Each structure stands twice: as structure tokens, then as C-alpha cells.
Image: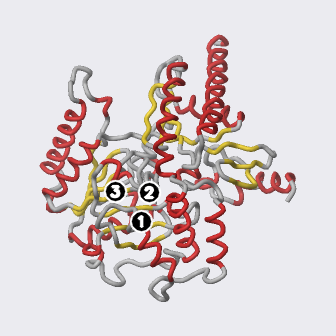
Amino acid sequence: MTAYDWKHRFDKMPDLLAPSMAKDHPNLPVVKEEGCYYYGVDGKRYLDFTSGIAVTNTGHRHPKVIQAIKEAADSLIHGPSGVIMYDSILKLAEELGTILPEDLDCFFFANSGTEAIEGAIKLAKHVTERPFVISFTGCFHGRSMGALNVTTSKSKYRKFLNPSGSYQIPYVDMTECPADVEDPESFVISKLEKDFEKLFKHQVSPEEVACVILEPVLGEGGYIIPPSGWLQKIREICDAHDILLIFDEVQTGFGRTGDWFAAQTFGVVPDIMAIAKGIASGLPLSATVASKELMKKWPLGSHGTTFGGNPIACSAALATIGVLKEENLVANANEIGKYTMDKLTDLKRKHRDIISDIRGIGLMIGIEIMDPITNEPSGEALLKILDYALEKGVLFYLCGNEGNVIRMVPPLIVTKDQIDEGLEMLDQAILMYKEEREQAVVGL
């Protein structure tokens, strides 16, 4: 394929693909991926700090994952689990049991994070025979109709769709804590208790609530990291009212937070977990996870799938977990994450008029951007900085309700040299934006 052929098709994209799918930022035309890099149609190499949005934790096209895919395709391509049964899905279930928190040892395999969330909510409602769900403002759990009931990261996802059956309380916000408070963690825990009390008193009784669902680290909503005690208090409240706790670990799983899962990072074990993204290095696979005792209460036919637990995807997942273990990538996420946060702290000092905050756990890092003139959160400034960064050769993504947080989620194979390279390009991009902004002000 020539560059001309690609350009011709790319120009036709608005007529070929739904804009809701095809118009995301930055729409970079690529022809290849390898390790921590994309290779563009323009012949340029781009350092990828998105991991396909927290998917390719082992890097793009890891040789052992590719080999597992090829070998699996020689035997089975499709197998509706239950109609037939195959070794890779059983091996994967056994292997996942070695890395998940204790008692989370039974699996319903699907294709996407949203499907895993749908399964988690259905399981909770079926087991408890209760109708309602509590979620947290700012969390993203998917865009299918069931998942939309609990997704509140952006109102546009829910517009015209009238999702129902859920109640929301605020996700933790440490910035709300008054400056003179000596123990900020105790302050936000107290607020959480009051939020639950108010909800139970005025909107829904706890006896009607099947589950509480949340992201243990807020993803799409802006990479907000809660105190461990805040999550532990949610666990206590759920236990007190026989409410099941669901962790959406679609983005935080498979080493991203410096542990296999955020549940281990924070020392809080949910009743049900939804996992996906990093599970199979880019192949579509997810799972709703719970104890055997809970899963046995979900009878045949109450949930199902045609493509979930695909044999090739399961083989890729087994290879993915193997690579994460063999190459110590979970530990690397912790080590390189701390290194990156130190470097970003220096960058924040240099650009204190642009970078208002940095937040990180493992290699899940958010860089909050503000307008240097107004000091207000600025999605416009962020997009321009990301465009300049791409021009330099590094790819970031965005998150946050205002679209003003740079989402930095490099593959877990990333090195210190690559972090240095990428942050140097980000530094240059910020300088370019500041110069542009200053010239615009002078022009006024």
C-alpha cells in the first residue's frame, strides 16, 4: 500500500466510519506498532505513552504474545464456551487465580470492559434480588445501556438515553479538604459516611441496593487516586448492609498501578471485579470475576456470550501474564512510575503556570493542565500541547471532565531513557504552546 492509497482512504473516512468512533484525538495514521512505538504513514516513529489506552501493558506486539496467537490459530479460531470446551480458557482461569486477590477465583469471560461491567451488575442483582446500584460521580464504566446507568464521567455519554436504576454519590476530592484540617484522609472519610447516610435517608434504602460499583482509581474522570482508608470505608459500609462491592479494574489491572490489581495496592478486596484492557495485549477479552459461591448462584442461561473467552484471545492472555511475570513488569511499573513522578515534579516547577497538578500510581499518571493567563482548567490548552507533543514525536491522550488532564499510561516495558525522551518532548510542546499563547495575548 502506498502513502497515496492510504491518504485516499483516510480522506474518505467520514463517509466510511461513524464519527462517534472515528473522530477521536489525534487520529494518527499508522502502519505498524512495535514495543513502545507506533510507526506513521509519514515514516515517522512515535513514542507511545497511551498503550492503546492502558491495553498493551506488555508493549505492542510482544514476540511471545504474537507466537502464542499464531500457535493458537493453528488449532482453534472460535469456540463458543459451553457448547465446546478448550484448554486455553481453563488454563487462563487457573492462571488468573494466581494473581487476583484471594477468593476471586471464578470467571465469566466476555470481550470488552463494558461487557464485564454488565456481567458484574447482572450478577449482583441476581444474587441479592435487589434492584438498585450505587456508583460514584466521575466514574466511567462503559457506554452500553446497563453500564451507562453507572457511568458519570461526562454527561454527553448519557444524553437522550435516560439511564435509570442507579444513584450517585461524589468520588473523593482531596481539594475540598480545608487547608487547616490536620488529617485530610479522616475528613474525606467522614464526608463519605455522610454522603451514604444522606443517600440512604432520602433516596434509597440500603435493603434495596444490590451493589456499589466504582473505579479504585478514577480513570476517564481525571486520574484521581483515593486514600486507602476511603476505599476501606466503602468496604465497611457495604458489609454493614449486605451490599456487594464491585471494583471496575478494567483500566487499573495487570500491573498498571504497581501491583497486579488496584485491589492489592489499596488492600481492599471487592466481591466482584471487572477486568479487561491489559488482559490480552490488545486482543478483545474481559472477565467478570467473583467467588465460586457467588457464581454458583448465577444459573445456566441467565447470562451468556457467543464470542467471549475466544480461544486465541485466551492464549494471548496466558502469554501476556507470562511476560508480565517473567520480565518483572509489575515491579517495573512501580519503579518507573516513581521515577516518572520525580521527573514530572521537576517539570511542574518549570511550568507552574501550565501544570496545576500531577497525580500518579504506578504507570497510571495524570498531568492537569490550566491556561497560563486565566489559571483555569483548560481542555483547549491541553489539546494544543498534545498536538505539539505529537509533532515532536510522542503520543499522549486526555481525560478529565473538562478534558484538561493528560493521561500518561506507557507500556510497562518502558525504560527510564524512554521516559526522559518523552518528557523532554512534552517540555518542548509546553514551551511551544506558551509562546503561541503569549503571542495571541500580545496580538489582542
Number of residues whose C-alpha sits closer than 10 Å to that of mark 2, classed few (under 14), some (14–19) or many (20 or more): many
Task: Give the x, y percent position of residue 172.
Answer: 30, 39
C-alpha gap between disc 3 and disc 1 = 11 Å
Q: The N terminus appears in which quarter of the rendering? A: bottom right
Visible residue check, residue 187: yes
Task: Give the x, y percent position of residue 90.
Answer: 45, 78
Dot 3 amino acid type: Phe
C-alpha gap between disc 1 and disc 2 = 8 Å
Dot 2 amino acid type: Val
Element class at badge 3? strand
Pointers 1 and 2 in contact (C-beta within 8 Å): yes
**Which numbered marker is on residue 116?**
1
Number of residues whose C-alpha sits closer than 10 Å to that of mark 1, classed few (under 14), some (14–19) or many (20 or more): many
Q: Which sits in the foreground, 376 or 231?
A: 231
Q: Quadrant of residue 312?
A: bottom right
Identified at 63% across, 83% down, the residue is 75
Task: Give the x, y percent position of residue 163.
Answer: 36, 58
Image: 426 above or below 265 = above
Pointers 3 and 1 in contact (C-beta within 8 Å): no
C-alpha gap between disc 2 and disc 3 = 9 Å
Image: 365 above or below 131 = above
Identified at 53% across, 17% down, the residue is 373
Report the residue marked by disc 3.
247
Q: Which sits in the foreground, 305 or 154?
A: 305
Q: Quadrant of residue 361?
A: top left
Task: Give the x, y percent position of residue 39.
Answer: 74, 49
- The reply, left or right, for residue 227 in relation to residue 153 is left
